[in-house]
Image (tube, helix red, strand yellow):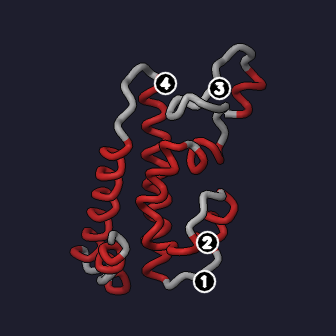
Amino acid sequence: MDRIARWSRGVDTTCVLCKNVPENREHLFFECSYSLQLWKSLAKGIMGSSLTNSWLDIVSMATDGVMERRKRFCFRYAFHAAMYSLWRERNRVKHGERLTPVIVLKKLVNKEVSNKLSLLRHKGVKEMQDTIQVWFSTRG
């Protein structure tokens, strides 16, 4: 996004989700008011008092191995689902579609994560059998 601004003078780099500031990785995924609402809804129960919207802190938490394995899997999958959904939503809006209300996006992404974790249980992935319960316990 920063490169687009450098390569293509005159291209509007304003965030299409909040329409407030120039878009960059940190803003699009974690600082934008729209994105932050999605991230908080997914991560608050997992991260608790460690909830952050810092890209570096989130990547560190996803890779450092401190979090219990099943909880970390839920965290990583929620991270992935949030990134994918926000990027898809951004592109939809860039191409003329209406912004999905964040409450709808929250429900869709939560359902996506729940379905993925449920699938692991039904496929018999032994070490991930109760990951769905871990996820549901964070939904409070």
Residue kind at label 3, given as amino acid type: Thr
Residue hosting label 2: 61
Furthest-left residue in view? 122
Q: Position of residue 63 (x, y in %)?
A: 62, 72
Q: CA gap, disc 3 to disc 2?
A: 29 Å
Residue hosting label 1: 66
Q: Which residue is drawn at 32% across and 85% down?
A: 126
**Sequence-earlier tag: 3 or 4:** 3
Q: Is mark 4 on a helix, strand or loop?
A: helix
Residue hosting label 4: 94
Residue hosting label 3: 13
The reply, left or right, for residue 22 in relation to residue 118 is right
**Sequence-earlier tag: 1 or 4:** 1
Q: CA gap, disc 2 to disc 4?
A: 31 Å
Q: Which residue is drawn at 29% across and 65% down?
A: 114
Q: CA gap, disc 3 to disc 4?
A: 11 Å
Furthest-right residue in view? 6
Q: Mark 4 and mark 2 in contact (Cβ < 8 Å)?
A: no
Q: Mark 2 and mark 1 in contact (Cβ < 8 Å)?
A: yes
Give the image quarter of residue 64: bottom right
Examine the rendered structure and indicate whether residue 92 appears above or below residue 24: above
**Sequence-earlier tag: 2 or 4:** 2
Q: Where is residue 87 in the image (x, y as percent from the top left)?
A: 49, 40
Residue kind at label 2, given as amino acid type: Met
Q: CA gap, disc 1 to disc 2?
A: 7 Å
Q: CA gap, disc 1 to disc 4?
A: 38 Å
Q: Which residue is drawn at 62% across and 27% down?
A: 14
The reply, left or right, for residue 97 in relation to residue 119 is right
Residue kind at label 1, given as amino acid type: Val
Which quadrant is the C terminus positioned in?
Answer: bottom left
Which quadrant is the N terminus positioned in?
Answer: top right
Q: Is mark 3 on a helix, strand or loop?
A: loop
